[in-house]
Image (tube, rainbow, N blue to C red):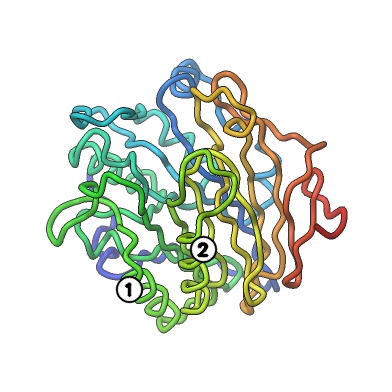
């Protein structure tokens, strides 16, 4: 495949759309998407892993997720790593149907080596599906994707802080953006200085199967918001974690699994689709839809379940993504 518009990657990738007058943008965000294993088998057989959330995706202006695997035919499994994933390139058109951008900043993007990661980035670019949190070199890995919706500029950044660190991009080598505090905060300030109305870092962090964020997550989230981020989103623990506000800005520490086979516990088979309402002043509200994963790791909405929501800096509870009262 030929590369598409790589010249744009020198700083930020701008993804323009025809803007229209509007006061707000709605943004859907999900956690880990792993399209190898049972979900990948189903996809190759013609199943759409996102079909049961088609309505929720169709209600928003843009959608993000964490792609927890390379999508490639090249490469070989990294020696010594317990779990390695690789999805078939036929996954890319399905992803492009639902998502506006994908984070590649995670501990599985390098599972099949740099060639598979390069093939993944080339395939996503050919499908005009922007990605962030990884690149052909260190500079590209730290670039922002800037989505423009209804005249609002939304800068997206992605970082991994879960081993192996050798997946990190180097000055001239492909890889992911590693979460070093000084670099993360500098990137946020850079995008704010370049005129982004909204800056959102998407983190791959925390301890697996821990339902509460660790002190490291709490500390870094506050630093990012103090540096100019408007919200902090996260994934990796394979379970959902808490949500809270800091200085009126939301933190969703882990959105959990969204498409991911191989888990047996109810906690690991539960994820959130978060819907954020954005204005040029920040995040005015967020809602969460509960996703229950089946035996193939495919999600379906659970409209009877309660989950965190928030508006005007106050945490509440939702049921079926409808506000039902204070937390």
**What percent of the width, then of the height, locates residue 173?**
14, 53
Give residue 139's quadrant in the image: bottom left
Name the residue that disc number 1 marks: 182
Cα distance in 3D space between marks 1 and 2: 32 Å
Residue under the point 57% across and 33% down: 268
Vertically, is 115 above or below 245?
above
Disc 1 crowd rating (10 Å Cα; few below 14, some 14-19, many 20+) is few
Mark 1 secondary-structure assignment? helix
**What percent of the width, then of the height, locates residue 120?**
30, 40
Q: Which mark is residue 246?
A: none
Front position among marks 1 and 2:
1
Give residue 213's quadrant in the image: bottom right
Front residue (pair 96, 322): 322
* Left or right of 274, for residue 78: left
Vertically, is 247 above or below 261?
below
Q: Earlier in the sequence, mark 1 or mark 2?
A: 2
**What percent of the width, then of the height, locates residue 84?**
31, 29
Vertically, is 146 above or below 132?
below
* Residue furthest right in the image: 324
* Left or right of 220, for residue 165: left
Residue under the point 28% across and 32% down: 72
Residue under the point 47% across and 40% down: 208
Q: Quadrant of the N terminus?
A: top left
Q: Which mark is residue 17?
A: 2
């Amino acid at each position: 495949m030929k590369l598409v518009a790589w010249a744009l990657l020198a700083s930020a990738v701008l993804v323009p759309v025809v803007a229209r007058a509007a006061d707000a943008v709605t943004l859907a965000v999900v956690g880990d998407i792993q399209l190898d294993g049972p979900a990948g088998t189903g996809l190759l057989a013609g199943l759409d892993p996102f079909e049961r959330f088609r309505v929720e995706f169709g209600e928003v202006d843009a959608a993000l997720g964490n792609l927890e695997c390379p999508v490639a035919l090249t490469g070989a499994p990294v020696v010594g790593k317990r779990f390695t994933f690789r999805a078939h390139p036929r996954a890319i058109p399905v992803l492009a149907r639902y998502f506006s951008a994908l984070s590649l900043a995670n501990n599985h993007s390098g599972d099949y080596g740099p060639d598979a990661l390069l093939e993944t980035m080339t395939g996503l670019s050919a499908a005009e599906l922007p990605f962030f949190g990884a690149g052909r070199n260190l500079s590209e890995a730290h670039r922002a994707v800037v989505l423009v919706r209804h005249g609002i500029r939304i800068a997206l950044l992605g970082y991994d802080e879960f081993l192996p660190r050798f997946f990190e991009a180097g000055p001239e080598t492909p890889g992911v953006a590693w979460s070093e505090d000084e670099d993360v905060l500098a990137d946020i300030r850079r995008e704010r200085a370049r005129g982004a109305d909204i800056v959102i870092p998407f983190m791959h962090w925390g301890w697996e199967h821990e339902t509460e964020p660790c002190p490291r997550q709490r500390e870094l989230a506050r630093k990012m918001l103090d540096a100019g981020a408007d919200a902090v989103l996260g994934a990796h623990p394979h379970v959902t974690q808490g949500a809270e506000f800091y200085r009126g800005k939301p933190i969703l520490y882990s959105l959990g699994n969204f498409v991911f086979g191989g888990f047996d516990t109810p906690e690991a088979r539960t994820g959130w689709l978060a819907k954020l309402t954005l204005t040029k002043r920040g995040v005015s509200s967020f809602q969460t839809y509960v996703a229950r994963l089946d035996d193939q790791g495919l999600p379906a909405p659970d409209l009877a379940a309660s989950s965190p929501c928030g508006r005007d800096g106050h945490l509440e509870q939702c049921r079926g993504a409808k506000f039902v009262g204070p937390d």
